[in-house]
Image (cartoon, rainbow, N blue to C red):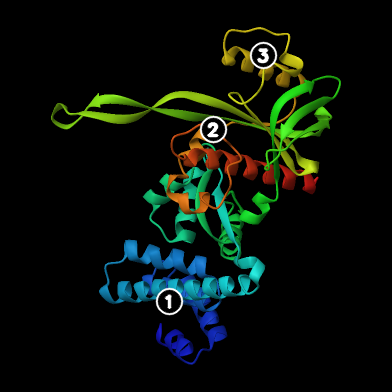
Amino acid sequence: MLEPVIAAFDRQDYRTAAQLLKELLKQSPQDPWVQFYVARLQEVSGKASAAETIYRQLLRQSTNPKLMAQARQGLQRLEEAEKERRQQAIAQATADASSQEPGVMILEAVAGENRNAIVQRFAQIMKIDTYTARGLLPSRGWRLYRSGSIGELQVYGQELLQAEIPVFWASLSELQAIQVFRIHYFQTFVPTASVVCFNDANQSGLLSFNWSEVGQRVEGLLPIFGQVVDLGYRDRLEWKEHVEDYVHVCDLHLIHRQCILRLVDSQYDFHQGVSANVHHDTIRQYWNELSAGLNQQLPETPIQSLFTPFAETTEDFTVVLDRIPSHIHLARSTDCYLDTAFHLYSSLAFLQRSRAIAKK
C-alpha cells in the first residue's frame, strides 16, 4: 500500500504523494508508517512544526527500530534546516553596521494557566530542555536573558513574539541616549515642580516640569556594604562583607523630554527647598515624607518596583554592565554591579513606556 507513496517521494512528486496519503489516512489513520509519510509531506511543504509533532509522537509510541530511526532522521533534518534558516536570518539582519551594535534581550513574566504551554514553545525555539526553560522564564518581573548584536537579538525576539512569548530588546545606544539628572532638592513642589539638579558633568541647574509630564516612576533599593570580623576556617578571624543598609532610589521619567530625574535618599539635600522647614530625626523619615508628596502628585502614574528580581538575573552579565554608566554615585569601597543594574532596569522601563505611549 505504501509503495506508490514511497515512489512518489523518490521522484519528488509531492502532489501525487498527498493524494495517495489522503486515501490511506481514510483507510488506516493510525498506521505509524502512514503517519510517518504524512510528517514527511509536512516537512517538504515547509510545515516544520506539524512535522516535528508527528515525528516526536512516533518516537514515543513506536517500537519499530526502522521507523524510529527514520523519525530521528526527520527531526535531525528539521533541526538542521531551522539552524540554517536562522543563520541566514541573522546574517541578513546584521548586514549593516547599525545592526551589529550591542544590545540586550529581556524576558517578561509568564504566569497563569498558559505558562506550561509557553514554556514548551520557549524550549522548542531556544533548543533547550523543558526544565531549563521553566527556570529561565520569569513568573514575576523581568529577566536579563541574552546580550549580543541587536540584529541577532531581533531575529530571536521576533520568533519568540510570534510564539506569544513576551520579550523585548534594546540596543545600548538607545539606553544611553536617555539623559539622567540627579535631583539635589525640590525648590518648588506645587503647582509645578522645579528641581535643582546635576548633569553628568556635575554641573548644577534648575529644571521645571509639570507633574503631568511624569510618565512613570521606577523605585528600588541598593545595598550599602560594610566589613565585619567573623570566625572562619578553624576559628580564624576573617573580614567578611555584609549589607549594612539600603539606599532608596526613585526615578521620575519625563518621557517626552527623553530624560530621567533621579532621587537618591542619601544624596538628597533635605535641608534646602521645600523640605527646609521640616524637621525629622532620620533620613528615612524625610524620605517617607517626600515619597508621600510624590504619591499625592502622581496618584495615577505607573510605578515599576520589581528591581530586585531583575537584579538577581544580571550577575552573569558584568561585561555588558561594564559598558553602561550607572549615573549613581554612592560612597563604596568597591564598585557594585547593582548600581548599573538599577540604571539598566530604569532605562529599559523608560523605553518600554515610551514605546507604549508612541503606539497610542
Give the alpha-carbon distance from disc 1 to disc 3, as whole Å.
64 Å
Residue lying at the far bottom of the rendered structure: 11
User: Which residue is label 2 attached to?
Assistant: 330
- Within the image, what quadrant is residue 267 found in? top right
User: Which residue is label 1 attached to?
Assistant: 77
Identify whether 318 is placed above or below 230. Answer: below
Of the numbered discs 3 and 2, the one sitting upstream in the chain is 3
Q: How many marks?
A: 3
Identify whether 144 is placed above or below 293. Answer: below
Q: How far across and down, in percent of the image, does residue 278 sit? A: 70, 8
Crowd around label 2: few <14 · some 14–19 · many ≥20 (10 Å): some
Q: How far across and down, in percent of the image, does residue 240 sit? A: 31, 30
The reply to whether the C-beta atoms of the residues labelled 3 and 2 are less than 8 Å apart is no
Q: The residue tagged with tag 1: helix, strand or loop?
A: helix
Q: Amino acid at mark 3?
A: Glu
Which residue corresponds to the image point at 28% horizontal and 24% vertical from the top-left? Answer: 229
Asked whether residue 171 is in view, the answer is: no
Of the numbered discs 2 and 1, the one sitting upstream in the chain is 1
User: Which residue is label 3 attached to?
Assistant: 289
Q: The residue tagged with tag 3: helix, strand or loop?
A: helix
Q: How far across and down, in percent of the image, does residue 227 sit? A: 35, 27
Identify whether 313 is placed above or below 282. Answer: below
Q: How far across and down, in percent of the image, does residue 73 sit? A: 36, 76
Q: Amino acid at mark 1?
A: Arg
Q: Amino acid at mark 2?
A: Leu
Q: The residue tagged with tag 2: helix, strand or loop?
A: loop
